[in-house]
Amino acid sequence: MTRRLAPYAVATGGAIAITAAIGAVTALASVSGLSALYLLFVLWLAARWGRGPAITGSVAAFLLYDFFFVPPAGTFAVRGPAELLELVVLLAVALVTSQLAGSLRRAQAAAEAIAGDSRALYELATSMLRTHDVNEGLRMVCENALRLPGVNRFAAVAMVAGHATPVAGTILSADELRQAEWSYQNGRSVGITIKDGLVVTMKTHGPTANTACLPLGSGVAVLSFDAQRAEPNELRTLAALIGLADLLLDRRRGTLEAERARGFEASDRLKAAILSSLSHELKSPIASLRAGLTALTAPRAGLEPEQRELLNDMDRQATRLDRMVGDMLALSRLEAGVELDREAHSFADLAGTALYQLRPEIKDHDVVLHIPEDLPAVEVDELQAGRVVSNLLENAIEWSTPHGVIEIGALARDGEVEAWVENDGPGIAPADLDRVFDTFWTRRSKGTGLGLAICKRVVEAHGGVIRVENRRRGPRFTFTLPLASVPVRK
Amino acid sequence: MSGRVLVVDDEVEMQRALRTGLGYHDFDVRAVGSGEEAVREATGWRPDVILLDLGLPHMDGFATLRALRPMTRAAVIVVSVMPDEKDKVRALDAGADDYVVKPFGTEELVARIRAVLRRQAAVPAGEPVIRCGDLEIDLARRLVSVKGQAIRLTPTEYELLRYLGLHAGKPVSHTTLLRQVWGEYAVGDKYNTRYVVAQIRKKLGDDPANPRFIVNEPGVGYRLQA
């Protein structure tokens, strides 16, 4: 109370002191215009304390001046318009100056408040972004939001697999969660929006009008607040906190996705490891089976031709079984993310190796090569890329006409090598062109359905593409391989 | 051509199948189930070829190979289910003459056994000329020719071809070639051998896409066709 009255006391006291000073000066010498001192004092009062003390000061000054210095001295008599004008001028100065000073003071106070808020927000943001636990950061955001006047409820909701999942803040009802979900899925805010960095209330006719939802990148901010009780800077802080929640929810999703990917990778590796030992276990009996079956096909075994034929059939089936086991293991290793041992290789070498390995199967076919001598080297894993060529060749052998033509070609194009294997067999049905690279898709009963799927995986692991088309002569498989970064020494 | 073949495999079914199958091809076959027995038979029975499975219990295939190598001149063919390329190189570098991947057919195995036996017979020490089809390598005069046409090779190219020729028919690993051609302390990678082989092929008129002389052993090295 005394602190509020102090300015008025100063105003009155000051006016008296100035009057005394003017009295003292005029007693010594006649100095005109000393009444301007009052004006100066009123200006100061207005700037320092505002309207009330300034008016008090100006009225006190007028009365004192009138009483002591305006003849007849010793009376409050006001004579003539000039003296009234003096009072009016003093009062006007007091009012106008106090108004100006007041708005300046308010602007400064507001600026200080914003600076304070920004500092607080900055500190909050850095501490939240520094926490390794995203959920802890979100809890801090909610706590700070709930501390703002007018904010009754505030919750950060994450979208997990399409469902609204509360993470931090006020406990929400099932209805509110449904509303949050709706808001996220439709990308529409309910009740509030953020405009120019401020939270703004909107008129909507939602099912629960007092709970507002704001969809964010990876979740929803759910809050209810009384806009009348909030100051603009608080609305700004609230908007900033929602922004932080947005950031943290994004980070939360990123973390979860990374964890999930790691989990998948681990399970892929486990699958490949299990399949590797299983393949070993499967191949050992197949090995004994094939050794036994093929032992008996020797002429010295003394079997009849049709018995030998039967054994040959069985051996082919055992071989097919072996291929399936091998292909399945190769595919699962590729899916687990096999490490490629990339080096510069000439495509002619890869083709030659595959042809050499397949020479018993391919000996009745006419192999035509279109590999330019100056073809630049490719940067590939020798074994994996070799597998692509030999799988495509086996496919071509399978489908070409007896003694038919198989063409292998390559050319450099657009910074990569485009290679193809073509046979003169029947074309692939248009509807199947997209499916030939699918796992287990096969158009013959003999195949494993994995050879072309393996080709696709290997080519893609090298950053290339593989496709099939029906050419005039027959189907052509085309794939791309990356060029070696080091040019082959000539 | 016949010979003594020692089968080292812990699976009884495989032993029996190979005894029967190789027997039909006139080989004299004995089968044992462990590395320790293999070492005993290698000195006692003196086989010409040892078929060594890498997946033996107790004393594994590599340990058996290391134990066998100093005590026998028999050719060792390593047999394995799903061998890694590293395993193949390791077996070759430890003194194996060839490798065969399980499962295999008897015909294929017989062909491999005959090839190593031929190699053993064909390389009497000091033989001055190596012949592989049209290719001739005259070791005494350091001359290489194809169909009688002299081929000019650089010293490195000649050394590499000579080494492959001395082991014609046998896969030779990149590391062995590097050591033999560039020296014991050669630092380098497969790129060196690939480059030199590409040069030799070009000079011999050997098409890499359809090799007549030097064949790639993917992930392992090269082999000169015998």
Image (tube, coloured by chain):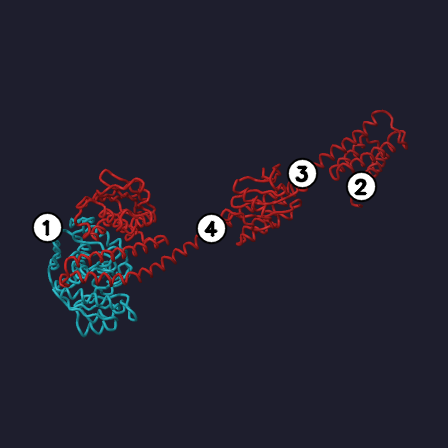
Per the rendering, the colour in which chain B appears is cyan
Q: Distance between the residues labelled 1 and 2?
A: 123 Å
Say which quadrant the N terminus of chain A sits in: top right
A58 or B104, nearer to the observer? B104
Q: How far apart are marks 3 and 2 (CA)?
A: 25 Å
In the rendered view, tell whether residue B86 sits above or below residue A359.
below
Q: Is tag 3's residue or tag 2's residue first in the polypeptide sequence?
A: 2
Q: How far apart are marks 1 and 4 (CA)?
A: 67 Å
The chain letter of the red chain reads: A
Q: Residue A107 carries which label?
A: 3
Badge nearest the viewer, 1 or 2: 1
Residue drawn at 82 percent across, 40 percent down: A13
Q: Is mark 1 on a helix, strand or loop?
A: strand
Q: Is residue A302 visible?
A: yes
Q: Is mark 4 on a helix, strand or loop?
A: helix
The quarter of the picture where residue A20 lies is: top right
Dot 3 amino acid type: Ala
Where does residue B119 sit, x and y in percent of width and height? 15, 62
Tag 1 subunit:
B
